[in-house]
Every structure is written in C-alpha cells, then in structure tokens.
Image (cartoon, rainbow, N blue to C red):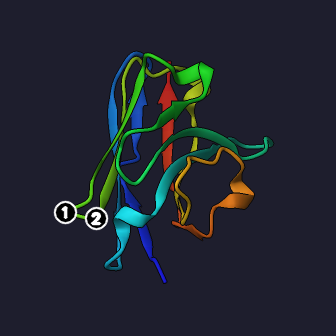
Amino acid sequence: QVQLVESGGELVQAGGSLRLSCAASGRTFSNYAMGWFRQAPGKEREFVSGISGSSITIYYVDSVQGRFTISRDNAKNTVSLQMNSLKLEDTAVYYCAAARTSYVPSADGAYTYWGQGTQVTVSS
C-alpha cells in the first residue's frame, strides 16, 4: 500500500514558476514509477510527466516539454515537478500517481495509487 500526498499548488501569474511535491509512504518507493497527471475543468485527465524508479527514464507530454522538470528522491520518498514559464492552459488539478512497473506508463489505468490532487491556477 502506498499513500501519496501532493503539495505546492497555488495561484500564480502566467510566466511564473511553481514546484509541486508528492510525498509517498511505504518502504519500496524505488520500485514504483511515478507519474504526474492533471485535469482541467471539463477535460479528461492527462499525463504530464513520468519517471522510472531509478530516474533513468523520464517522459513529458509535448505541451510541457522544456518547461517542466520531474525528479525524485528515493531516500526521501518524494517526487517533484518543477514548473516554469507557466501558461494559462496549465491551470488544472495536478495528481501524482504510482505504478509498480519498470517502465513509465502514460495511461492512467496503469497507475494503482493516486494522491488527492493539488490545484494549480495560472492567471493572466
């Protein structure tokens, strides 16, 4: 069982930066691929970024490539998402999720554990 708690979401102006963090419980954090998803009002949840247990494999959705950076600290059981050059369209509830896989899934169905979400609002 893995419990995930996100933090760091807030209101920020376009062009600004935020750092989201996700704290995980459990002793086998490094066995899990971690993903960040987001869901904007009226839209489906989408994959944003993912990182393998060893941090060797990292993926980003095209819309955040070059602006967002995912990282993890297995000693601290945390995964972070540094978001720079934020745009209005980045406004969403952001979720972290864990999948016990050696690869990094982009499908939300592959993730077993989910956090409660943290709201990111980008204003003009």
98 vs 83, nearest the viewer: 98
Residue farthest along the bottom direction in this orientation: 1
Task: Classify mark 1: residues with Cα within 10 Å, few (<14), some (14-19) or many (20+).
Answer: few
Determine whether 1 is above or below 10 in the image: below
Residue 38 is drawn in which quadrant? top right
Residue 110 versus residue 65 in the image, above or below: below
Q: Residue at x 56, y 49 (%)?
A: 103
- Type of amino acid at the residue the image marks with label 1: Ala
Amino acid type, callout 2:
Asn
Residues at marks 1 and 2 touching, judged by CB atoms closer than 8 Å: yes
* Residue 54: percent from left, percent from top: 35, 50
Q: Which mark is residue 106?
A: none
**Residue with the mark numbered 1:** 75
- According to the picture, the residue beneath numbered tag 2 turns out to be 77
* 58 sits left or right of 16 in the view: right
Q: Looking at the picture, does residue 80 appear above or below residue 96?
A: above
Residue at x 73% of width, y 43% of height = 41
**The furthest residue to the front:** 102
Q: Nearer the viewer, residue 95 or 73?
A: 73
Q: Secondary structure at mark 2?
A: loop
Mark 1–mark 2 distance (CA, rounded to whole Å): 6 Å
What percent of the width, then of the height, locates residue 3?
44, 76
Question: Which percent across, then down, holds residue 21?
Answer: 33, 52
